[in-house]
Amino acid sequence: MPTGPFGLDPILWAPLRLVIAVVLALFLVLNGALLQIYLERKIQAVIQDRLGPYHVGPFGLLQTFADAIKLIAKEDVRARLTDTYFFLAAPALVFCPMLASWVVLPFASDIVGADLNIGLLYLTTLGSMTVLGIVIAGWASNNKYSLMGGLRSAGQLISYEVPQILALVSVVLVVGSLSMVDITRSQSGPLVNVLVLPFSFLVYFIAALAETNRTPFDLPEAESELVAGYLTEYSGMRWGTLLALSEYGNVTVVCSIMATLWFGGWQGPGVDAFPLIGVVWFTLKVYGFILIMMWIRATLPRLRIDQLMSFCWKGLIPAALVNILVVAVLALAFPNTKVPIAIASWLLVAAFVAGIPLVQRRRLASLRARTRAAATPVRAAS
Amino acid sequence: MRFDFVEPLVFALLSLGVIVGGAAVVLIDRITAAALFMAFTFLCMAGMFVLLGAETIAAFQVLIYVGAITVLILYGVMFTKYGDRPYALFFQRQTPLAVVFVASVGVPVALFSFTFTSGTPPRGGGDLPSLATSVFTDFAFPFEVASVLLLAAMVGAIVLTKREERKETLR
């Protein structure tokens, strides 16, 4: 009889492994969401010169646990005119792809659910499925604010998927693999990919902010205009699944992609001697990005929907296409060294940053012209 | 006991999903539900690609059809705003005609599929390197023709919407 790991029959081991992986992923998602909500409140409080949660537990650490228990114990309220099946299905449709994408995240050299050879493609695929659930949530709520949120979300997520995937392509071109484990292994030294491809990282970071509905791209749930967007009719644990678990889970997945692709994933000092330290490095890198996202949320105002769309289609997508072109040409021309790619990529970053004031000045000029044009007839009439 | 029984079982479940989902897309009279069933059918198709060892094609199937096309259809449904009332399409009221058409296509397909024999295809035919090589060498010309066609369609769509806009401003 063949034996699998731990002397178990493979027929027993296969389902057992599945259960362990799913339970572990659920555990990480649930606790990660609790931790991130706490961090989000505390960091915003610090930035806004407040105290934040401090009543429950030391430093308010147990506040989110109390909130989670409240959410679970809450009555399941459902408006009568909502579309029953779709309304119930939407949180699951948002949550399941997010949970499934945890399978390919490499936490340490051997701690990965499945080392798929198309891991990166799998992650982008699941990221694109989230849109469906959000659109369905907006539609099923039978409420104009929800519908507006769902429509905005569909437009925004489909648009920003394009630069996001285009930014990933340049990394794949340089590394030559779609597997998350291989991509991490290719950056074993201090020369991580962000030093070679900073421009694609910049594009991916901006697109990822939009993909996860974070400020300044949180239009689908803009509190001040749309009540809560597609979340308006949801309450209790359905709201908790849609917003807290799925949003923070998606943020974690996106930050893990950034840590793996551009910052070497689990690689760090001491990993060769003790492979388990990789988990610590990976977690530190991921939470570093999460903290930057929270900082941005507390700092930047929200974009308008037309600004959002024109920024994506006129700014990010051409930039990402130019980036792919440059990286592909240089990778073909100099197959043995990454230096030309790095120089070109840093030049692109410089050009992008230098271009911002020019665009802003043109925009300011057009705004002034419009104000003047609007002011003239009033003066003539009076 | 081995895992040999798993693959036919999964195949049976997936084909059941494809057939039921596809039938529901045509028969159901609520257009949003039909769109969701379409997404379900596409997902089952992706599962079939995984069974065939073509994970890349499965991923693209989900990425493009579930993630983009279904969402665009739902987007269109929401913009047309006729509400979510039951709505019988013209072909859902013409049962005798539909039976004739389905039989004229279905009988040859059934005859073909029951008499079809073929050797087992090579494993990993939809794998990324082999897919990329075949697209950019053997099938480079059809690939380019398809992309030019899509580009023309996109430009045409943009031109059409632009013309509509001008008419409205003239009015």
Image (cartoon, rainbow, N blue to C red):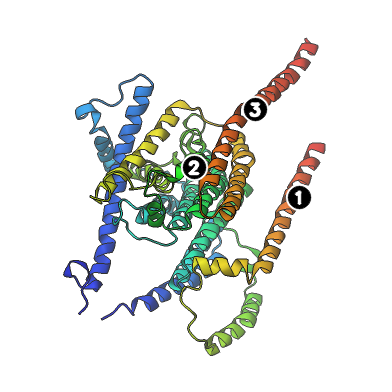
Q: Is residue A154 visible?
A: no
SS for callout 2: helix
Q: Residue at x 27, y 53 (%)?
A: A24
Q: Residue at x 38, y 52 (%)?
A: A184
Q: Nearer the viewer, residue A182 or A254?
A: A182
Q: Residue at x 57, y 31 (%)?
A: A353
The circle drawn on residue A84 is none
The circle drawn on residue A201 is 2
Q: Position of residue B150 (x, y in %)?
A: 69, 59
Mark 3 in CB contact with mark 1 (< 8 angstroms): no
- Determine which residue is flagged by label 1: B160
Q: Which numbered disc flags the more N-terminal residue, 2 or 3? A: 2
To the question of a shared chain for discs 1 and 2, the answer is no
SS for callout 3: helix
Label 2 – label 3 distance at C-alpha: 22 Å
To the question of a shared chain for discs 3 and 1, the answer is no
Q: Is residue A102 visible?
A: yes
Q: Nearer the viewer, residue A98 or A6?
A: A6
> Callout 2, which amino acid?
Phe
On the rendered image, what quadrant is the C terminus of chain A found in? top right
SS for callout 1: helix
Q: Residue at x 68, y 23 (%)?
A: A367
Chain designation of label 3: A
